[in-house]
Image (cartoon, rainbow, N blue to C red):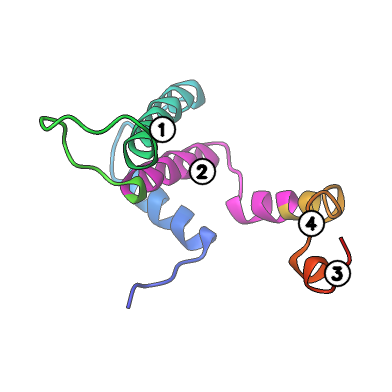
Amino acid sequence: MKESKTLSEMQEEVDQYIGQFKEGYFSPLAMMARLTEELGELAREVNHYYGEKPKKSTEEEKTIEEELGDMLFVITCLANSLNISLEDAHNRVMHKFNTRDKNRWTRKDAEENGNN
């Protein structure tokens, strides 16, 4: 079974990894460029699996999971470099969705009870 980690544990693990190197974290602007690059790679994989553009036989096999992992690593680096807790950021955004957007979508329980 895979080991579960909290966001804090993942941030600490990434910080320990980056801390081994004299270069440390890249600048926030460089990380944004890297995040954009990784997003493009994710988009390419999604297009290959779900879109109309099949992979060329010469293209390296990657997965959506791998590309999401790359993005998560860069996001974690960016958060760490700016001293941002991803757990706090997650809690804030969930609060926003649970308050501002609480009635935006059709709830399954409302549909099941015939209350559209």
| Along the viewing direction, whichever of 90 and 18 lies nearer the viewer | 90
Measured in 3D between alpha carbons, the distance from the residue under mark 1 to the one under mark 3, in whole angstroms, is 38 Å
Q: In this view, does 5 lie above or below 63?
A: below
Percent of width and height locating residue 104: 82, 48
Q: What residue type is labelled 3?
A: Gly
The residue carrying mark 2 is 80
The residue carrying mark 3 is 114
Circle 2: element type? helix
Q: Which residue is drawn at 42% across and 40% down?
A: 71
Measured in 3D between alpha carbons, the distance from the residue under mark 1 to the one under mark 4, in whole angstroms, is 28 Å
Nearer the viewer's eye, disc 1 or disc 2? Answer: 1
Quarter of the image that includes the N terminus? bottom left
- Please rate how many residues cluster around mark 3, counting C-alpha atoms within 10 Å: few if below 14, some from 14 to 19, many from 20: few
Is residue 19 in sight in this rendering? no
Closer to the N terminus: mark 3 or mark 2?
2
The residue carrying mark 1 is 43
The residue carrying mark 4 is 106
